[in-house]
Amino acid sequence: MPKGNVVFVLHAHLPYIHHPEYKFFLEENWLFEAITETYVPLLRMFKRLEKEGIKFNLTMSITPPLMEMLANKSLQEKYINRMTKLIELAGKEIERTKSENPKKHKMAKYYYEDLKEILYIFKDVYNGNILNGFKEYLEKDRLDIITCNATHGFLPLMEMYPQAIRAQIEQGIKTYEKHMGRKPRGIWLAESAYFSGLDKYLSEYGIEYFFVDSHGFWYADERPKYGVYRPIITPNNVFVFARDPESSEQVWSAEIGYPGDGRYREFYRDIGFDREFEYIKPYIDPSGVRMNTGIKYHKITSKQTPQNQKDFYDIDEAILAAKEHAMDFLRKKEQQSKKLISLFNGIEPVIVAPFDAELFGHWWYEGPIFLEEFMRQASKSSLVRTLKASDVVDIVEKVQIATPATSTWGANGYNEVWLNGTNDWIYPHLHEMVEKITELAQKYPNKDEVEPEIRRALNQMARELLLAQSSDWAFIMTTRTSVEYAVNRTKTHIKRFLELYDMVNNGKVDTKKLSYYEWTDDIFSDIDYTMYLKTDK
Amino acid sequence: MVDGNIEKLKRWLDSNPTIQELKSQARILGLKVKRMMKKREVIKLIEGYINQMQELQEIQRPSSANSANNVKEDQEIKQEEDIKLPESYNKNKLVVLPVNPNWLHVYWDLSDKTRESLMNLPNGFRIVLRIYDVTFIDFNGNNAHRTFEISIDLRTMKNNYVNVPMPNADYLAELGYVSPDGEFHPIIRSNLCKTPPNSPSQSTRERWLDIRKKRKIVTPSDGVLVKEVETIPGSIFNNNPLSKEESIWQLFSRLRSGRGM
């Protein structure tokens, strides 16, 4: 009996945010929150399913900046410090909530135990580097970990610079190999952004498959017979999967998606904002800026309920909701599969459901429970099975050849989230940086013959360029929230790059400055500026 | 700008500052201070600002970029503030980027020499950007399918958004001037830019790869099996849904909704 194949893809990504020059830096918390709410809960889910002997299959991209942050000793220490403080706060909350409300008190005890367990997993099980956890399940073949282009740079807007595209791909692969000890088979292109011709570069680097949004298939140069429900292969021999719009909407949509259920935890009510200042002060930004702690006592209740009238959250009620939703999702996938199998005359459909990993746990607190329950129930289904993208590549016998259409997973499907009036000012600089580093790479083509200080400066220029290219900064500018950090980061990398350019050109390297930049923008220790020599089309 | 300075600002406001201090603080905050304003009015102005910022804070994650008293280790080189980037790289450059199937973004840079000569054109000369549709053409300067021009003011503009008629087409731009006799004199030519397609292909063939036999098969297409019903969202930039009332995750899900939802 043919079955429907469900390929779950979690795209785990955060921009590289490391500020060793500060003991405390707010944006580093993006990583810490994601570790606590998403990455460790995923590992915990793998372990539980494994113990129960349940077969699960997941595809996960862990981007190079995220890998570099997770492997970074100083960030690991900062995380442990942060968690130690949070556990202290959670302990106080147990006392505090005793007289407030039984539901709050129940949650306070829950958080205390949960945070302790997460820190234990982080510190004692994985010795501070949870990448080892993901690697373990990669080796057990439950998880298909893929890479991403180096700093999540938006490739369609680099199209005229092949060397910039190659550098993004090459560094992405190198970083994956460094942390995973093997070559990646697939890639998640930043923002799922593909332009016609990009497959050539992927094939140069031995990438076997990537993903596009649905309309990448719908508008392909030749129409895929099975729509988005079978992979295609490009003329350059790279497999492509397309997103199933139904799955996305069921899970991801802000309007009708599961995460909006009233029983789920309300993201925007946090004791970091609700408790009185003197009490909460030791657990927020030392400058007095209030921030999320992760301890939250309210449920969504309804989307219309104002923040100050939300009901109290109950974890057991929420777990029940997540299990219901997992069953509902499975039923929907089974129905969809049945329909597609009969339409395809028995050919098995491949339903691809990609999401930002951080949706599960960070934005949608119960997301990991949903996923775990889905995997548990799906393993018993007679109509669907879960597969990894690499499994599909390994078993497909006949595949349609086509070139997907230029597309992204951004609003309206093209480039406008990353190129509009709020962020277009960055591109003249980013392009100029590519030209300048190419010019210097051509001037110093043999890195072994270059004075060490010049070589260091050139390598640092490559780091600053890659960091400036992260699509996150343009994305944040479009959201018009927390814009200042994104603008400042972009400008800082451009400025540092231009300073280093002048130093190299003048033959006088300010080693103090250079060392400082190497210390603060410390991504990709193995970087090699000569990758910008690869210009030929 | 949402930050811990708000708490500080509140405390400062309580410390009964003078009218001069109040006015200068209001200016620093970017508020419009009128000369005749009374102390009470300036305080009101600043309080309004505080309220607005606190509202914003509800939905925003605060940023360290502007938290004043961050615990800094002793470092001789500090975080730069207010970084000035070059206005020009003194190069003649014209770049066309695709925004979506119907819009191009064009930006330019000019060398000092070019800029000077263009700025000093005699009366009757116009600076224009010319767009060419060169789909399937080996462009020789005057064999484009269609072309149109946009007048440019080099003193105020560094880029432009251009509406183009055809998706899935190749475009080129040239920056130059039109002399009084109506002739166009190009100075810089851009890269080639392809707009994305936004409708299914007209192709009537299918190519298949038999992986086991390593054989390619080409057949006429007998149509697609899945009839996709596409929902086309309205432009996110038209009705300005990116308001501050919208929570960040709703915003994320909207911005990452692609075209398929």
Image (cartoon, rainbow, N blue to C red):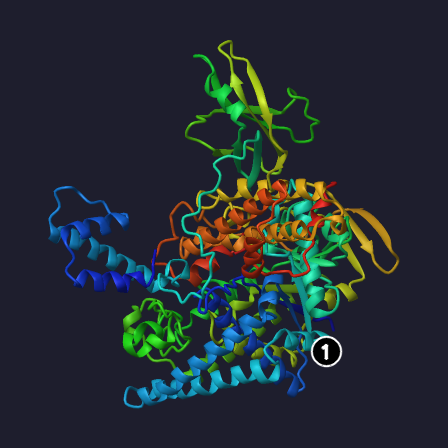
Picture coordinates of residue A371, whole percent (x, y): 56, 75
Asked if residue A179 is positioned above or below residue A477 in the image, the reply reads below
In the visual, does A103 lie left or right of A342? Answer: left
Q: Residue furthest top?
A: B181
How many C-alpha atoms fall within 10 Å of the one at disc 1: few (<14), some, or many (≥20)?
few
Examine the rendered structure and indicate whether residue B118 appears above or below residue A89: above
In the image, is A420 to the left or to the right of A168? left
Percent position of residue A331, x then y: 57, 73
Relative to the observer, which residue lies in front, A520 or B88? A520
> Image point 68% across, 62% down: which residue?
A175
Q: Position of residue A319 (x, y in %)?
A: 47, 82
Q: Is residue A9 left or right of residue A26?
A: right
Q: Is residue B222 visible?
A: no
Based on the displayed image, in which of its 4 quarters is residue A43 positioned? bottom right
Percent coordinates x, y for residue A257 in the rendering:
47, 66
Q: Choose between A123 and B95: the one closer to the eye.
A: A123
Q: Is residue B175 visible?
A: yes
- Chain letter, disc 1 residue: A
Q: Which residue in the structure is indicated by mark 1?
A: A140
Q: Report the front residue among A154 and A57.
A: A154
Judge whether B182 appears above or below B12 on screen.
above
Q: Quadrant of residue B131?
A: top right
- Res. A435 image quadrant: top right
Specify the amino acid type for callout 1. Answer: Lys
